[in-house]
């Protein structure tokens, strides 16, 4: 306020006072710029679009993980429906709707960017188009956050299915390479040796973690009996104890940090 819809006013007004009363740190620096832009609306729309992008990605994971091919999670009946044709099918409707809402948030952002891209300085009636998109995005983002929270609260985690999936695909191959590097073997060579071990496991119809000491030593004599420990799934998980890693202690630290952050919001 105080810009008089263009370039200021000759009347003696106190813009500092008005700004403070309205909860702002200070008035805008240039009146013509203030009247001309809708950066505040664009920033809201961009932040919501970013939020919805992350919600959509999480929703996609839930959709995939709840499929019969994965079976990592089970979505509560409250947030799923049956199929109109297949009696046995359970549709992850709410995650799919959350994913769909994201396109709407993107559209509102792009719509306002398009409105603003060709406007001359000062106020133009086109700018009235900012409100509908902002109100729509804010409303949908609030609903999406609340609904996603409830979906996650009622989610069933199928731990056994996840662990079984983690024990195939030679996931401990990097651990074997790390084991060799720790014993002075250059990573390039360790990578090659590990590749041979994986090929052996494939020929034997096993996962790399299922190979015995003699089988591993047949690939390279420098592989010791202690290498088997490195192929253990839980050991592999807890070995990644760098900041942001997957070890139990580090994950607990991350959770605690996020809870502390949420408490401040």
Image: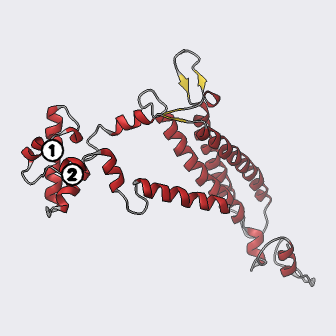
Q: Nearer the viewer, residue 26 or 168?
A: 168
The label number, if any, that marks residue 99 in the structure image:
none
Which quarter of the rendered picture does the C terminus lie within?
bottom right
x then y, percent, for residue 134: 73, 53
x then y, percent, for residue 17: 87, 80
The label number, if any, that marks residue 197 in the structure image:
1
Q: Residue at x 82, y 73 (%)?
A: 6
Crowd tier of the residue under label 2, counting other residues whose Cα lies within 10 Å: few below 14, some 14–19, many 20 or above: many
Q: Is residue 157 left or right of residue 133?
A: left
Label 1 SS = helix
**Residue 15, above or below 148:** below
Tell me which corner region of the image, top left, top right, bottom left or bottom right, holds residue 69. top left
Q: Are marks 1 and 2 in contact (CB under 8 Å)?
A: yes
x then y, percent, for residue 119: 71, 63
Q: Which residue is mark 2?
A: 176
Res 43 seen here = no
- For the residues labelled 1 and 2, the Cα–Cα distance comes to 9 Å
Q: Residue at x 59, y 57 (%)?
A: 259
Q: Residue at x 43, y 60 (%)?
A: 244
Tell me which corner region of the image, top left, top right, bottom left or bottom right, holds residue 188. bottom left
x then y, percent, for residue 53: 56, 49
């Amino acid at each position: 306020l105080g810009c008089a819809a263009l370039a200021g006013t000759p009347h003696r007004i106190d813009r500092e006072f008005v700004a403070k009363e309205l909860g702002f740190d200070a008035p805008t620096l240039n009146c013509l710029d203030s009247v001309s832009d809708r950066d505040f609306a664009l920033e809201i729309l961009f932040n919501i679009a970013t939020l919805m992008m992350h919600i959509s990605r999480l929703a996609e994971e839930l959709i995939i993980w709840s499929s019969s091919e994965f079976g990592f999670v089970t979505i509560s009946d409250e947030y799923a429906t049956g199929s109109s044709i297949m009696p046995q099918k359970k549709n992850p409707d709410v995650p799919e709707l959350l994913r769909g809402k994201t396109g709407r948030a993107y559209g509102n952002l792009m719509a306002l960017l398009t409105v603003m891209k060709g406007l001359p300085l000062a106020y133009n009636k086109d700018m009235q188009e900012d409100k509908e998109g902002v109100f729509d995005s804010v409303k949908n983002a609030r609903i999406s956050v609340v609904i996603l929270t409830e979906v996650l609260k009622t989610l069933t985690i199928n731990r056994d299915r996840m662990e079984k999936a983690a024990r195939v695909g030679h996931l401990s191959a990097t651990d074997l390479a790390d084991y060799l590097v720790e014993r002075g073997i250059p990573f390039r060579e360790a990578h090659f040796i590990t590749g041979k071990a994986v090929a052996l496991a494939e020929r034997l119809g096993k996962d790399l973690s299922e190979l015995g000491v003699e089988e591993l030593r047949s690939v390279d004599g420098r592989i010791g009996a202690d290498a088997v420990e490195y192929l253990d799934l839980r050991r592999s998980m807890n070995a990644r104890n760098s900041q942001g890693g997957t070890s139990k202690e580090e994950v607990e630290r991350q959770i605690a940090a996020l809870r502390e952050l949420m408490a401040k919001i």
